[in-house]
Image (cartoon, coloured by chain):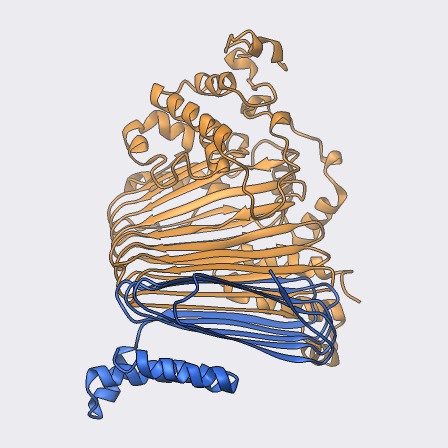
Amino acid sequence: MPVITVKKDEERIVPLLWTGKETELEYRVKLAEPGAKVTFLGLLLGREAQALSLNVEVEHAAPYTTSEVVIKSALSDTAKASITGLVKVDPGAKGTQAWLAAHLLLLSEKAKGVAVPSLEILENEVKAGHATTVGRISEQELFYLMSRGLGEAAARALIVHGFLQEMVDRLPKAIAVRASRVLQEKYEQV
Amino acid sequence: MSGGASVKTGYPLGFHMPESGGFRTPRGLSRSVVEAISEHKQEPQWMRQFRLQALMMFEQKMMPTWGADLSGIDFDAMHYYISPSERKFHTWDEVPADIKDTYDKIGIPQAERQFLAGVGAQYDSEVVYHNLKKKWEDQGVIFCDTDTALQKYPDLFREYFGTVIPVSDNKFAALNSAVWSGGSFVYVPKGVHVDIPLQAYFRINAANMGQFERTLIIADEGSYVHYVEGCTAPIYTTDSLHAAVVEIVVKRGARVRYTTIQNWSNNVYNLVTKRMLVEEDGFGEWIDGNLGSKVTMKYPSVILNGRGARGEVLSLAFAGKGQHQDAGGKAIHLAPHTTSTITSKSVSMGGGRSSYRGMVKIINGAKGAKSFVRCDALLLDELSRSDTYPVNIVSEQDVTLGHEASVSKVGEEQLFYLMSRGLDEAAATSLIVNGFIEPIVKELPLEYAVELNRLISLSMEGSVG
């Protein structure tokens, strides 16, 4: 398992676009020197019987390091995503800022999501948090769009795009272009 | 008294002392020890079988590979049953000074101190208890110790015993099932509201102060009961393992609230399995405070088994020097429109470690299920540690699940503000800590809340600056 090591005052973006090819992915990031910063952006688009087990581990090994891990996933059919995240803050890594978030949107009856965002913190001068949400398209949002004249399928597609677009906007350009194309092809109608 | 030789000869009653003289099993655990416990208590055949089966499970099960370090437990060095008359009491002089000091500072009455420190056999609350007991009996409420319930209400007992937490659940539930003794049995009939909290404290005596307590609560349809266990004051014991099991059945439309505050002395491994099965429109609540012990592993669970069932877990953990509090909660949604909330607050100081470990599971078909988990941790110094291990498993689309957690230290600005108002650092810190845990403390019975606040102020003394 290769470790991505981030050096002094370096800023790294680690993008991930999953469209069903891999079944298992692992990322390990070490913020090795002061001022190191990592942003992990995961966009998981699963359909049919695709399944992914994703494991992201970030270690804050030096003071004043920053990590942000954001994973958004839309799952249709019987797709399944299992997301395990772990942010470790070593003793002495003062001034650490860590944020770990996983948001799953279930688009079908049989889709399944597992989220385990863990923290291990051995230093008190830190700001660390995590959040998880799992749910489906909200009835109110759907109702609102349909009351404005959109058909149900178009309204759903718009909501899914809204949910995922925020991630696409943050991805590096090359991968963002690919992500937009996938979004357009796969989620034109939901 | 050791009786080791007689075990090897296979004569199970070799160490059975005459009834009047008291009874204890030799150190270690074996088939003959379990049989002797059952024999001593004159239990029915099915319970003996249950215990023996549990012993087999205990031997087969591995120690948990996750969670706290349990390598210090020596199963062979323990006595698994000591009858009340055999129980040794230490003298007041033997009680460690820091524990006596704590009693002083949080204002525990002398009679209670003796009991809590294991000096006296019985806390004298008989008079109060008798009046209440009559009232409960008139309502048809059963409240007695678990051994008595097995003898007096065999059918009711057998119907529910071991149904919420099966023997095979985990190694320590299996151990408890094999050697259990004491604990409380509560039955609340249909529609009955018990308006005064039932406290184990009222009828506690040496017989109930077991290491392997077994509690079973059944709230029949539409009933309500609040059960309170433990206390904020430190309990001094020389037993190093406390492995209890608490099973609660909440029938249709019933509500049960179970409050625990535990403050074992810090040589104790506190490994407790607690679970509620909640039926249609029922409401089950755990309020669980863990202050003492060396290691705690405890995750009160709600299984939401009927439509509209609700579950709530409030967990409070306070880890000081040398302590690991591995606590949290679980909510398993098995039916539509079930809701759960888990709120956890933990404080680590002086090199202590507190871990939140929790699970929310929503099965396919539990439509409209809602769950919200919030866990906050406060780290008071740079020696301490805080972990969060939340597991969320969702197999149903129509759900709302949210989880939030934060880890922080006592803010410099908050401290500065309070100190500029004339408080010293210890007082300011304890005020902030008390504010942090307030959402849980406000749910506690008043006397517990007061003692807890004092206890926290006490732990802050000399810890800052």
Q: Which residue lies furthest to the bottom in this view?
A: A148
Q: In this view, does B433 lie above or below B62?
A: below
Task: Find residue A132 and report its image quarter.
Answer: bottom left
Q: Which residue is drawn at 72% across and 75% down?
A: A7
In x, y percent, where is residue B247? 39, 42
In x, y percent, where is residue A180? 40, 84
Q: Is residue B315 above or below residue A73?
A: above
Q: Is residue A120 above or below residue B155?
A: below
Drawn side of residue B356 relative to residue A49, left or right: right
Q: Which residue lies furthest to the right in this view?
A: B465
Drawn side of residue B415 relative to residue A28, left or right: right
Say which quadrant the C terminus of chain B sits in. Answer: bottom right
Q: Is B432 in front, or is A66?
A: A66
Drawn side of residue A16 relative to residue B114, left or right: left
Q: Residue at x 46, y 81 (%)?
A: A167
Q: Is A178 in front, or is B62?
A: A178
Task: Find residue B242 and report its image quarter.
Answer: top right
Q: Chain B is drawn in which colour?
A: orange
In x, y percent, where is residue B387? 59, 59
Q: How many labels does the image show?
A: 0
In x, y percent, where is residue B57? 45, 30
Q: Which residue is drawn at 56% across and 24% down?
A: B82
Q: Is A59 in front, or is B21?
A: A59
Chain seen in blue: A
Q: Residue at x 32, y 38 (%)?
A: B137
Please indicate, yes or no, whether residue B181 appears anywhere in the rendered image: no
